[in-house]
Image (cartoon, helix red, strand yellow):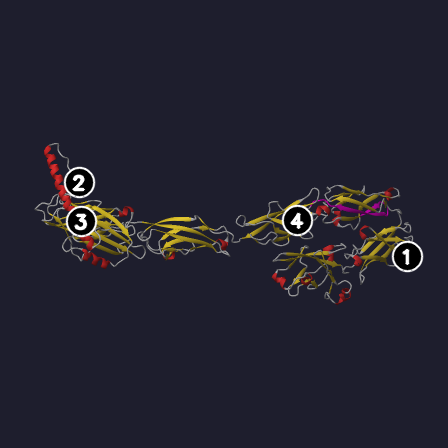
Amino acid sequence: MTKTIGYRDWRWQALWWNYFFLAWSTIAGQTRYTIPEELKQGSVVGNLVKDLGLGLSEISDRKLRVASEAGKQYFSVDAGKGELVVNDRIDREALCGQSASCILPLQVVIEDPLQLYRVEVEIQDINDNSPRFPSNDVTLEIAESTAAGVRFPLESALDPDVGSNSLKSYYLSKDECFNIKIKDVAGGRKVPELVLVKSLDREKKAVHKIVLTAIDGGNPVRSGTTQLSIRVLDINDNVPVFETPVYKVSVSENSADGELIVQTKATDIDDGQNGDIEYSFGLHTPESIRSLFHIDPILGKIFLKGKLDFEKNANYEIDITAKDKGIPGMEGHCSVHVEVLDVNDNAPEIVLTSQPKPVREDAPSGTVVALISARDLDSGDNGKVILHLSKESLFSIKPSFSNNYALVTNGILDRESFSQYNIEISATDSGSPPMTSKKSIPVNIIDVNDNHPIFTQASYNVYLKENGKPGSILYSVSATDLDFGENAKISYSLLDSKVQDVSVSSYVYINSDNGSIYSMLSFDYEKLKVFQIRVQAKDQGSPSLSSNATLNVFILDQNDNAPTVIYPSSAVLGSLSHQRMPRSAKAGHLVTKVTAVDADSGHNAWISYKLKEATDASLFTVSLYTGEVRTKRAVYEQDDSSQTLIIEINDDGEPVQSSTVTVSILIEDGLHEPILDLRKKAEPINKSGRITVYLILSLAAVSVLSLVTFLILAVRCIRSSRGNGSCCMRRSDFDDYKNPNRNLQIQLNSDGPIKYVEVLGGDMMSQSQSFRSCLSPMSEYSDFTFVKPSSTTDFKEMMNVLDASLPDSTWTFESQQVSR
């Protein structure tokens, strides 16, 4: 396909149709264009985007760019048209010298995803250089005795152009004694030789002035001239002659300084000084050759005195002159062609064509990470490069073309194990011995949310004292996430659950940032003993991952409830009830029994009773653990008939909580004394017979009394069961009794001394419980406790029931609660 390039100026118009064209072709994935040198900046090379099968939008979207291996950016891409344009002056002679082919390799790199195209631009020569002689004036001395046909080598003109534009021929201005011949030497050079066609006669003409013109093959033709001044000498008519006009030698580039390269030899058939030869480099030998080589002027040996470098120059042409010492001196000439042999002295080089891109840790195998190329300045096998990675690497190298490779993934990546890989690539050439170089390429791994948050424990046990302040911290949970950034940022929340049919969020609150859990209210052990909190830790990844943990919260009891007196009750419209007892009561007589409960648990609910105050402390005693009020001695006639007892009830908590109850007792005459304590042991009987008689009489009396007592009790129970249906009093274990603010219902049934008390309690948060105590009025040893579910009633209603159940002026009692 041919591309058309605009004119640089009108003088080049004729050259466009012959040289200024572009041709591109795609062979094995490569595109080639051909352009002449010296195009003006902005000249179009070709439609790169179209030729590569791309769209205009991909130039910016995929970040298309052009990289030159020559080091200088000669070309750029027009983002608007997709055309490859000239970016800087291109001088073929500066780039490629005298090389027959001049190729500028370009790499077109496209990112997202990474792609690499190789483009070659062939630079064609134009005839922009004229042949030029090393000097404008050359003087030759030729003996007049020189025979016709002798040739004298002249300086070659230099033309940097190549091909048809290079040096083509020479011609002389008209002279009857001289002519010009062109000699082709190694390397394609054309050397002019001045040919003597007619014998010289110094007497006729001592100096010949001739103009030597060099012309090239360009169109139009360019030329250069030099002035030849030929002085005719009259002596020494034989020139030194070399063994061969051209010496060819091959030298390794690692040859040591001072090594013999070649020995030249010339002979002169003249005698004496006319045949004595001295060797030297040609008059116009460049300094680059003089710095590398040295010639022995006597022996004609050429030695190495510098360091050869095949990669800089693989061939040298050295002009040697052999001049005799005659007058005038005669010269012979030869040429030495030195070929430098390559050795493996350059290590391979690894070049990053594109910077490595971060890779997601879940990237599939074969994902392109970076584009790389390898090169070696050596030639042949010394320049063949092989790339390889370590066997354990999770990456591999995929060949592309022309020493270009793609670095791709070759396994499962894990950022949590390695967040960055330093991939070490080794490049080894095929030389002997081989040379190796290494390059480390850092590849960052992008995190993917593939790890759940992990709590320090699957479940936590939290022990919390009751009555804490709302808003106080209960516990702090913590979870960790092995991911990074937002994928590792954790927020905490409560999973919805019920505690006593109420959402757990009504009880506690969690800080979503740090996992601290705070109470929303003050917990009461008597209402709630244990509950569960389910906490979720969720990361901020997409999609987010989460895990759960369970907190078992145990409420610890505090001694925050004073004992509650359930019998006898003091809430009877402010008046006192009186307990009756006969004046004939003996020591140990059961007067009444105080019953109290404590809503706390454990040691905090252990209750003890003691007599705090009494009208006559010597008359009554209170059992420490049962609350039974008994006489300590028999009642005397002088004892007051009205006795008041203040009984203190204490729990076993810390600090101690206590309540008091006031009991008024009326001592009356004529009342029958209750049955004595059946458990009281009979006193030992003396050995005498009198005691035996007393014992028989006592047993008879007791039997009669017992029979009468049982008959009375049976009648009373029958009457009681008809009136109230029960003859016992209930007392609760109060494990679920919470506080004095609960609704209570106390029911007393009595037809004299109280035999039945029922306490009903309940609240909105726990199941109602009832407490029933059963007492036999004639015996302190009948004490039973039953528990049954019951509904809650108003406290005032309970007081009305209590008041209605008490007999008039039978007995009184008071109770008061002492708060903490």
Judge whether residue 522 can be spotted in this image: yes
Judge whether residue 814 can be spotted in this image: no
- Mark pair 2, 3: CA separation: 23 Å
Q: Residues within 10 Å of mark 3 (few under 14, many from 20)?
A: few
Label 1: which secondary element:
loop
- Give the quarter of the image for residue 765: bottom left
Q: Are marks 2 and 3 in contact (CB under 8 Å)?
A: no
Disc sitting over residue 680 in the figure? 2
Disc sitting over residue 349 in the figure? 4
Label 4: which secondary element:
strand
Residue topped by disc 3? 714
Q: For the residue marked with disc 3, what is the amino acid? A: Ala
Q: Are marks 1 and 2 in contact (CB under 8 Å)?
A: no
Label 3: which secondary element:
helix
Q: Residue furthest bottom?
A: 10
Residue topped by disc 1? 176
Lower sequence index among marks 1 and 3: 1
- Magenta-highlighted residues: 319-345
